[in-house]
Amino acid sequence: MAKELKIAPSLLSANFANLGGDVEKINHSEADWLHLDVMDGVFVPNISFGFPVLKAVAQMSEKPLDVHLMIVEPQKFIPQIKELGTMMMNVHYEACPHLHRVVQQIKEAGMKAGVTLNPATPVAMLSDIIEDLDMVLLMSVNPGFGGQKFIPHTLRKIQELRELIERSGSHALVEIDGGVNLQTAPLLAEAGVDVLVAGSAVFKAPDMIEIIHQLKNV
Ligand code: DX5
Ligand code: ZN
């Protein structure tokens, strides 16, 4: 039997007029983590939510927090992200000229360290840091918005990443973010990913609990 996928619903597509209700539903689902997308309007052409919202959500969530920072200079916010009780802090490769230092700082703060790659960034850029990483998050859309179409060449990148992880003896998990739904999830499972982020597929579904169950068992 294939290994079990972890599912991380992305709150970006939730009903912001009833965030508490949506977090509550995730709490009662088979979701493994809660994925929180922070955008600054600089690194990506959109703004999502900041610390007041993150704090309220963190207090309600019974799922470990997987925080995806789409911001410049993410290292500035390590203490505040830790303060939320974050399990995994993901920074973008493209936003960190001193990535090695940032990864060490995240781990010293007591969090797991994830590095995210945009669709146009080759997996090989991580070859000198892969052993230090707890996770690699491959973007399968250009970051900034929910509801976009999955970019198919991500499947080839997953294969390259798995090879890099195996070669280096790294324990990094592979997470995919963007355009994940019941059509793309089976391909991703087959390609060997560990964690699927799903925003619109979960929060726009008529039954969130059921869709999470289905994604987990593709
Ligand atoms: C996009 C975010 C995603 C987003 C995914 O920049 O990083 O987490 O919520 O949305 P879907 O699953 O709708 O593609
Ligand atoms: Zn994300």
Image (spheres, rainbow, N blue to C red):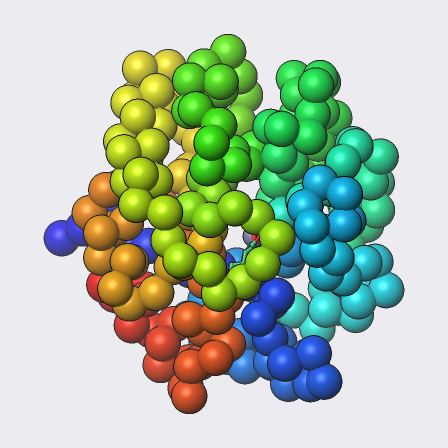
Q: Does residue 102 appear in this view?
A: yes
Q: Quadrant of the C terminus?
A: bottom left
Please determine whether, in this image, residue 125 is positioned above or below residue 67. Answer: above
Q: Does residue 113 appear in this view?
A: no
Q: Residue furthest bottom?
A: 206
For image coordinates 54% across by 62% down, the residue present is 146
Please determine whether, in this image, residue 147 is positioned above or below residue 113. Answer: below
Residue 32 shown left or right of residue 12 in the figure: left
Where residue 214 appears, as percent x and y from the top left, is: 29, 72
Where residue 192 appears, as percent x and y from the top left, is: 26, 41
Where residue 22 appears, as percent x and y from the top left, is: 60, 80
Give residue 184's quadrant in the image.
bottom left
Where residue 57 appears, as percent x and y from the top left, is: 72, 69
For image coordinates 83% across by 58% down, the residue present is 51
> How many tags in the picture?
0
Give residue 43's quadrant in the image.
top right
